[in-house]
Image: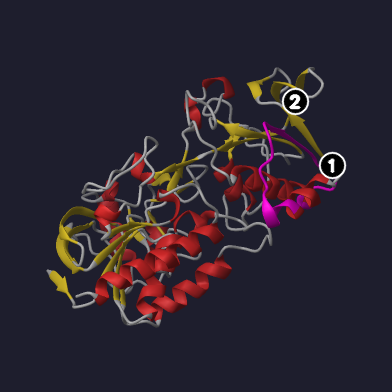
Amino acid sequence: MTEATNRSILVVGGGMSGLSAAVEAAEAGCHVYIVEKEPYLGGRVARMNKYFPKLCPPYCGLEINFRRIKTNPLIRFFTLSEVVAISGEPGNYTVRVRENPRYVNEKCTACGKCEEAATTTISNPFNYGIDTVKAIYLPNDFAFPFRYVLDPSVIGTEEAEKIKSACPYGAIDLDMQPREFELVVSAIIWATGWQPYDAEKILYYGFGKNPDVITNVMMERYASPDGPTAGQIIQPSTGQPAKKVAFVQCAGSRDENHLPYCSGVCCLASLKQATYVLEQYEDAQVCIYYIDIRALGRYEDFYNRVKEDSRVSFIKGKAGEIRRTESGKTMVQAENQITGEITREEYDLVVLATGMVPTTAVDKPPVDIPADENGFLLETNGNIGIIPAGCVKRPVDVAACVQDATAAALKALQLTARR
């Protein structure tokens, strides 16, 4: 299969940056292809509970973009797909794409009969492994496309046949195979986003061994109404309400042994998540351990609003050790840089503010794109046809991602106009 048009753009990544770039380019009259490795569009924004500073749900922005995609015939998207090869030059690229099987076709109505027939469970990737799902599952309640996906681990088993038989619409196709096809495009927008830094590498924080130490992305899922606890913020080890919560800033960031840079959004994310706890429990106690709070410009008002709550305290000092105590609580030890005091305080839950790692630091594009020492892509005049956008360029928040994606779309449109 080869797709070709006179004016076409490929967007790699279906998160907020990719979606924004795609709809902007398509609404300017350009054919657009979106390639996304997950079985749904929306990226990490789809896993969030709320945006800051307005604290509205992310589906507000995603729903608008999904509607724009549905109603625009110039946009085609491929989920469970990846770019495996790129050749050509600006204005004329040939891109090879591999589409992995979903084992569920377009006849799916998401009725759930297949899920009822399944017995095997797998770790739930949408909830960062906090809970499990059946081997055939709907990726999330707001999934786009709204279609089930079958985990390949059960292919070839009796269970797979049972799942197929349970579908009244003939939507289960166990014979699906990976397929490869080519796209001919004028420009490529690389918007594959970011992933959280692996907190298990920070040995002195105990993540992975102490269930009551979680990361900031996991906290978003705990607080989400469609999350593993239906929005209840709990102590994972007991299931009891987590009313006393510590947020540990720069968990692995600004550290030459881990991430040497600041991700910029972590302070605001923790301030936002502090409001989750405060809203849920009137007798909550929140403590934020920080090096310095970075809430610039219009975000300073948000910081001051959280800071003024008497239930919130701040300790200027990086947590040196986090360990589980005999009482079943989790103790955070830190040196208060203002008083010089060594503090040791026990909490129900400790949230690590891990930094943002560009996906390009781990999963490199199959073409030579300049990058810095941390894997962030660089824009150069020598490679104008492959345009980085969003968090593959630098750590940024959702609003900045949308702005950067619009700029990337404009650059890509200039290349299509030259054909």
Q: Is 419 rendered above or below residue 132?
A: below
| Towards the viewer: 231 or 48 | 48
Q: Which residue is mark 2?
A: 346
Q: How is the image coloured?
A: secondary structure
Q: As drawn, is 195 to the left or to the right of 51?
A: left
What is the residue that sits farthest to the front in this orientation? 381
| Secondary structure beneath label 2 | strand
Residue at 79% across / 49% down in the picture? 304
Q: Position of residue 403 (x, y in %)?
A: 50, 64
Q: Position of residue 74 (x, y in %)?
A: 31, 80
Residue type for callout 2: Glu
Residue type for callout 1: Arg
What is the residue that sits farthest to the left in this orientation? 1
Q: Is 389 rendered above or below residue 145?
A: above
| Towards the viewer: 307 or 7 | 7
| Towards the viewer: 23 or 109 | 23
| Secondary structure beneath label 1 | loop
Q: Position of residue 130 (x, y in %)?
A: 52, 42
Q: Which quadrant does the C terminus fall into?
A: bottom left
Viewer can see residue 214: yes
Classed neighbour count for the residue bearing mark 2: other residues with Cα under 10 Å, few (<14), some (14–19), many (≥20):
many
Could you tell which of marks 1 and 2 lies nearer the N-terminus?
Answer: 1
What is the residue that sits farthest to the right in this orientation? 310
Q: Which stretch did the figure color magenta? A: 279-300
Q: As drawn, is 183 to the left or to the right of 243?
A: left
Q: Which residue is mark 1?
A: 311
Residue at 72% across / 45% down in the picture? 274
Q: Is 143 rendered above or below residue 86?
A: below
